[in-house]
Amino acid sequence: MWRYRPLIERLRRGRAAIVAALTLVVLGAAINREHALIYGLFSVMVAALLAGYAIPLWQMRPLRAQAGFIGGDVEAGATIEVAVSMVNAGWLPRRQLALIISLRPGRRAAVEAGAFAARIRGRSQTEVLVRLRLPARGVYVAQAARIESAFPLGFFTCRRSVPAAGRITVLPRRFAVAAPNLAGQQDGFGAGVLAPRAGGDGDFSALREYVAGDAPRGVHWPTSARLGELHVVVRERTVRPLLCVVLDTRAKAHAGNGEAHSFEVAVRIAASLAHWATERQIGTQLVVLGARPVVVEAAASGPQALLIQRALAAAEAQEEAPMRELLRRAMPLVWPHAHRYVIFAEGEERSADRSEDAIAALAVLGLEGAVLTALCLHRESFAGVAMENASVLRRRLAARCVNSRVIGRDERLERLFA
């Protein structure tokens, strides 16, 4: 019912205005008729207006309240409980009290919820639980808390502020991701994959016939002499896979509304990929593009992985610089030899030259032996237009040797990454 509070407040003010207008009409009739009964009716209506204003003020005077500290991390869509201690220092009971708490997630509209206390006895203390549902990701800051009362007639509402402090991080929604093939770098710890190659360092794996391009130092001369053909030693080394997720934060590139906004979908994809990797002890790096790129790294699940999810919860699409400029600033910070997922929205660049520059900047991220996958959110699709140029975009990215996938508004992410 808290979503209807503005309407209820307007009706309450309208009710008081109607009673005040009727009081003036009765006063005019009493002066005109000079009848004692009409004067008596006028007195009753004036008394009702005064009581409707004075009693809520009287109710608020002895009340004191303190909201419990609000903090922690929860998933999007979770419901939290905030305990508020209310003290009635007066001798008489107080009735029909409403307690409202408001949390604001950054620049978005505040989330408001409340609870009712039907009666608080005199000289007593009671605890009221306020349940707030946090539907979307973000860092919610306790903006305000207050006690309200319109008892008994509902003509006027009296409010008193309640001290409230704290912040709560609502982590982005995630979905199940199947295991992608990740590039990596040699490392002596953590989860790894076996990368066989002829010659070089590593543990012995097998012998095979020599083929053009094999390193001469890998030739196993005793076996070659015995069989009369060159054979090389195949060795295996442990390669630690690495994942780097790059998130596009250009404001004009994204489109849509609510949870169907392309930036919210991009954050969900980034959160799901990072969660999948950290749960498997895979080194993960998050790079949030911007004038000052935000870089968060995690080697495994736990506190470090939570830092990535918190950074995604606080991410906002508010950059104005073009894609190529944002990528240029982030390139020195990106892990070398990691599998790089660049999640971006296509459609901001109006000219072909600027668009090609952005695609060329993406291709640079695939250099130095790294594997690049571009996840392109089709801006027109999220704006409600059919995906007409998706194949053209894929061909342009393929011409730059960029592995890509174009994602529309109606795509099922669970199926795409299954």
Image (tube, helix red, strand yellow):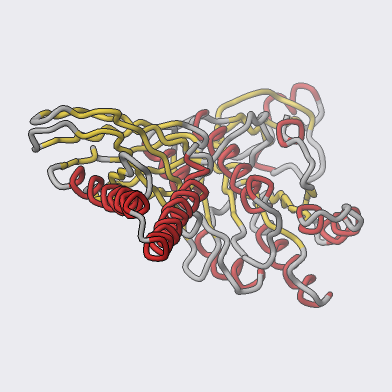
Please indicate whether residue 79 sits to the left or right of residue 359 in the image.
left
Q: Residue at x 47, y 40 (%)?
A: 2
Q: Nearer the viewer, residue 33 or 350?
A: 33
Q: Is residue 296 visible?
A: no
Horizontal side, residue 120 vs residue 385: left or right: left
Give the residue displayed 80% in from the left and 56% down from the top.
Answer: 401
Q: Looking at the image, can residue 384 be seen?
A: yes
Residue 206 x/y as whole percent:
68, 23
State the residue at coordinates (82%, 43%).
Answer: 212
Res 65 → quadrant: top left
Question: In this orientation, which residue lies closer to the viewer: 127 or 53?
Answer: 53
List x then y, in percent, for residue 224. 74, 28
Q: In percent of the image, x 34 and y 49: which residue is there? A: 37
Position of 114 relative to 377 (above/below): above
Quadrant location of the C terminus?
top right
Image side of residue 286 versus residue 340, left or right: left
Taking the image as shown, residue 239 lies to the left or right of residue 309, namely: right
Establish if 369 lies above or below 127: below
In x, y percent, where is residue 109? 50, 54
Nearer the observer, 269 or 178: 269
Q: Is residue 334 above or below residue 195?
A: below
Quadrant in the picture for residue 86: top left
Q: Position of residue 93 (x, y in %)?
A: 17, 31
Number of marks present in the image shown = 0
Q: Viewer-proximal residue, 276 or 35? A: 35
